[in-house]
Image: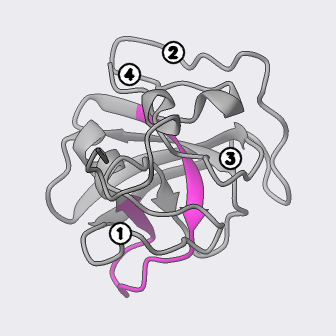
Amino acid sequence: MLALLAAASGLSCVSQAGAASTGGALAGTTGHAANQIHTTGVATWFGPGFYGHKTACGQTLTPAVVGVAHRTLPCGTLVKVTYAGHAVVLPVLDRGPYSHIAEWDLTAGAAAALGVSETVRIGTKVVGAAPNVPTLGMPAGALTAPITGGAVAG
């Protein structure tokens, strides 16, 4: 299974068949109540063209980064996103989307985990917060690999 959040944060993916494993790392969100429900919202996705650039929250975007952009939620806010029978817990890593039709912008890694390939309507729920560290959103195995846009150096 695709690990969605950095091992350093103590969090893991929520899949269609499973529940979130928090490892005790969930904290209350800042300025937003935990379990706040946004029943549905329009989501787009981004990635190519932004790889190698820093997100508004300080992470370097690569194809492996799994997260979501939102205009107002604090960096590190954890959002359970559901789409077509899939569910993942994603950290807020960036500001956006800049599209006027969407409330959410998924990284390419998050879109792939959810099976999203176009603009879609998703379900969302704020479920907690994680420390906003530079590795937030990186799969656990990618933490030891250099940040090269998905390519392995060597």
| Dots 1, 3 in contact, CB < 8 A | no
Decide: is 59 above or below 116.
below
Sort mark 4 into few (<14), some (14-19) or many (20+) by Cα contacts within 10 Å. Answer: some
Looking at the picture, which amino acid does disc 4 mark?
Ser
**Pick the front one: 144 or 93:** 144
Which numbered disc, 4 or 1, marks the residue that appears first in the sequence? Answer: 4
In the image, taking residue 95 as reference, residue 47 lies left or right, namely: left
Mark 3 touching mark 4, by CB under 8 A?
no
Q: Identify the magenta region.
A: 88-106
Q: Nearer the viewer, mark 1 or mark 3?
A: 1
Which numbered disc, 1 or 3, marks the residue that appears first in the sequence? Answer: 3
Left or right: 41 in relation to 140: left
Residue found at x 73% / y 63%: 74
How far is mark 3 from mark 2, CA to CA? 18 Å
Q: List the residue tagged with mark 4.
A: 15
Q: How is the image coloured?
A: one colour
Q: Nearer the viewer, mark 4 or mark 1?
A: 1
Q: CA distance from mark 2 to mark 4?
A: 7 Å
The residue carrying mark 2 is 19
Q: Is residue 90 magenta?
A: yes
List the residue tagged with mark 1: 51
Q: Cα distance, mark 1 to mark 3? A: 31 Å
